[in-house]
Image (cartoon, rainbow, N blue to C red):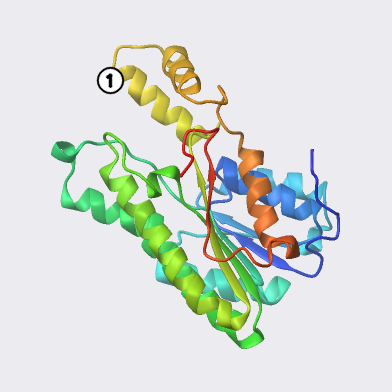
């Protein structure tokens, strides 16, 4: 259930990368309900079409822009920004939700694995943001929310590549926030633990296979390890992102908001 006013983001244009993933999808629906114009992008054309249909039940179709893009590709990034601005105007808010997971140990990793993870989870988001940031600076307004992870705050077994990319995102968030606030632009991150999405399901399935357990056993073990005894839902993460975009969060700058079910308290 939404706790936000229907006009909380009225007049704003929110671009969401990774909108074909669970967190991106939920975020798009939530900000649409708050009155924002919405650009959604990702690599899965079918899922983008499905999300567009959902959004059209919430908002005017003229306030939705959809474009398939691979944000690791410079020309795709540039075309996305041009077309989104042409369709819906100044991009006032950016949610960097695109990303992939991985769970190889150091002895299983190659240099190319690290490079690929950094490219998808960090460098592409940085490059897209840098271009959008230019106009935000000119207009002296904007919000940027990066989807990091608890793995950007502490390392875990078999998580070298992924944690490296998310640590990079947290460092970038904090440093950029100090620069951007001079232009009335806020930069923050959210750091979820396990979220009930296809990506986490895949991680649980791989762990089940590698440890001769069932998926149910692996998931239950993960849930029992949390003080809250349950995995975070994608809409809970989306609601946190949406809050950070609102004027209610005006003095939240450079933060890494943990959504851990009590697993991380410092």
Using residue 252 as the reference point, say whether residue 101 is left or right of it: left
Q: Residue furthest front?
A: 266
Q: Looking at the image, can residue 49 be seen?
A: no
Quarter location, residue 68: bottom right
Question: Residue 35 placed where, x, y %?
Answer: 81, 59
Q: Residue furthest bottom?
A: 138
Q: Which residue is mark 1?
A: 210
Count how many numbered circles sit on residues in the image.
1
Q: Residue furthest left?
A: 107
Instruction: Give 150 or 11, whichever is nearer the viewer.
Output: 150
Question: Residue 110 placed where, x, y %?
Answer: 16, 46
| Image quarter of the N terminus | top right
Instruction: Give 254 or 97, whichever is nearer the viewer.
Output: 254
Is the residue marked by circle 1 packed among few (<14), some (14-19), or many (20+) residues within 10 Å? few
Using residue 44 as the reference point, say whether residue 56 is left or right of it: right
Quarter location, residue 13: bottom right
> In the picture shown, does residue 142 fall above or below 265?
below
Q: Residue at 64% of width from left, 83% of height from top?
A: 140
Q: Residue at 57% of width from left, 77% of height from top?
A: 181
Instruction: Give 168 or 124, whichever is nearer the viewer.
Output: 168
Question: Residue 183 placed where, x, y %?
Answer: 59, 82
Question: Residue 44 placed where, x, y %?
Answer: 53, 47
Q: Looking at the image, can residue 173 be seen?
A: yes
Quarter location, residue 26: top right
Q: Residue at 67% of width from left, 63% of height from top?
A: 14
Q: Residue at 57% of width from left, 46% of height from top?
A: 20
Q: Secondary structure at mark 1?
A: helix
> In the picture shown, does residue 179 fall above or below 120?
below
Using residue 204 as the reference point, say whether residue 158 is left or right of it: left
């Amino acid at each position: 259930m939404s706790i936000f006013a229907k006009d909380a983001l009225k007049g704003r244009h929110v671009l969401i990368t990774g909108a074909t993933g669970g967190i991106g999808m939920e975020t798009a629906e939530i900000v649409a309900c708050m009155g924002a114009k919405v650009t959604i992008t990702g690599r899965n054309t079918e899922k983008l079409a499905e999300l567009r249909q959902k959004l059209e039940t919430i908002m005017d179709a003229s306030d939705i822009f959809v474009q398939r893009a691979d944000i690791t590709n410079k020309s795709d990034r540039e075309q996305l920004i041009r077309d989104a601005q042409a369709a819906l105007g100044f991009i006032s808010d950016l949610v960097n939700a695109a990303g992939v997971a991985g769970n190889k140990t150091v002895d299983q990793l190659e240099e190319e694995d690290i490079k690929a993870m950094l490219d998808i989870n960090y460098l592409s988001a940085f490059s897209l943001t840098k271009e959008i940031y230019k106009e935000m600076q000119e207009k002296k307004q904007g919000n940027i929310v990066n989807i990091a992870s608890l793995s950007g705050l502490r390392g875990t077994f078999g998580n070298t590549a992924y944690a490296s990319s998310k640590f990079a995102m947290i460092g970038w968030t904090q440093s950029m926030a100090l620069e951007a606030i001079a232009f009335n632009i806020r930069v923050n991150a959210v750091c979820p633990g396990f979220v009930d999405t296809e990506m986490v399901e895949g991680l649980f399935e791989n762990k089940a296979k590698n440890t001769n357990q069932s998926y149910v056993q692996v998931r239950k073990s993960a849930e029992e390890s949390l003080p809250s005894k349950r995995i975070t839902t994608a809409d809970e993460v989306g609601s946190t992102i949406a809050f950070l975009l609102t004027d209610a969060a005006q003095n939240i700058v450079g933060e890494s908001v943990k959504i851990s079910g009590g697993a991380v308290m410092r």
